[in-house]
């Protein structure tokens, strides 16, 4: 009887031990599962953060571009005033003498334009202005650097700017030849005639 009892107790012990092992394996599986879920959550958070950063960068660039466009539009409207328009025309062409007062006006207008250009240049270098907006600025700068008066104004003003923008402006000066006898008004008149209905007859 003692042997039978001992065998029964041993059987119960083995079953308890087996159940305990199964319970431990279940806890281990739960642990690994929780670690997997946590890893997925971390990856998801990083992806979301990356999307948020990209969205913020796009918004920041849009704000910078809008500011640049507003600044350029306001400057153009200011120069369109009768007094400044006359001075700007004479200064850009460089073929009419300027009074000292007109010369001061011309140089201050040019300084404002160069400062605006430097801001666009630095924003692009900092990654806050996209390539298309910067290319638009460069196209405008190349156009105006072809005028004799603007070239002379840059040579007088270049020393007032940082070395990187100064090198950039000097490179434009070297790349863009002076447009001899450039007259945007005459060019506009020629284009106007070519676009008139009579021109196609």
Image: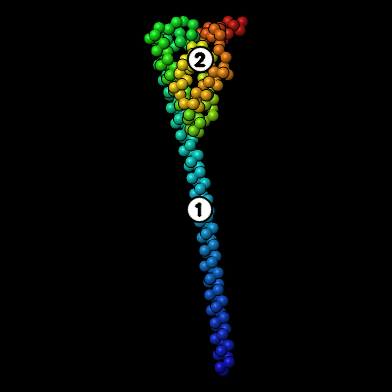
* Residue 72 visible, this orientation: no
User: Which residue: 56% across, 93% down?
Assistant: 2
Residue 107 image point, x, y percent: 42, 15
Nearer to us in this view, 10 or 85:
85
Q: How far apart are marks 1 and 2 (CA)?
A: 59 Å
Residue 135 image point, x, y percent: 54, 25
Which of discs 1 and 2 lies nearer the camera? The answer is 2
The residue identified by callout 1 is 41
Q: What element carries label 1?
A: helix
User: Which residue: 52% across, 12% down?
Assistant: 147
Residue 68 image point, x, y percent: 45, 26
Q: Which part of the image, by quadrant, shows the C terminus?
A: top right
Count the labels in the image: 2
* Residue 14 visible, this orientation: yes
Q: In this view, does 140 lie above or below 51?
A: above
Nearer to us in this view, 39 or 2:
39
Nearer to us in this view, 18 or 83:
83
The residue identified by callout 2 is 151
Label 2 CA crowd tier, 10 Å (few <14, some 14–19, many 20+):
many
User: Which residue: 53% across, 79% down?
Assistant: 16
Residue 45 image point, x, y percent: 49, 49
Q: Is residue 38 above or below residue 104?
A: below
């Amino acid at each position: 009887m003692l042997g039978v009892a001992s065998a029964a107790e041993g059987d119960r012990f083995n079953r308890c031990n087996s159940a305990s092992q199964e319970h431990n394996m279940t806890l281990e599986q739960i642990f690994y599962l929780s670690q997997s879920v946590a890893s997925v959550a971390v990856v998801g958070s990083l992806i979301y953060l990356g999307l948020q950063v990209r969205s913020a960068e796009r918004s920041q660039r849009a704000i910078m571009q809008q500011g640049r466009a507003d600044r350029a539009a306001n400057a153009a409207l200011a120069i369109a005033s009768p007094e400044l328009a006359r001075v700007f025309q004479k200064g850009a062409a460089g073929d009419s003498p300027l009074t000292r007062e007109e010369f001061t006006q011309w140089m201050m207008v040019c300084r404002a334009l160069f400062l605006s250009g430097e801001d666009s240049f630095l924003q692009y270098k900092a990654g806050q202005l996209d390539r298309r907006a910067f290319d638009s600025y460069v196209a405008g700068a190349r156009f105006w650097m072809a005028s004799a008066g603007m070239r002379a104004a840059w040579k007088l003003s270049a020393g007032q700017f940082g070395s990187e923008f100064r090198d950039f402006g000097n490179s434009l000066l070297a790349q863009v030849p002076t447009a001899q006898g450039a007259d945007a008004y005459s060019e506009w008149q020629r284009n106007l005639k070519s676009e008139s209905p009579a021109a196609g007859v």
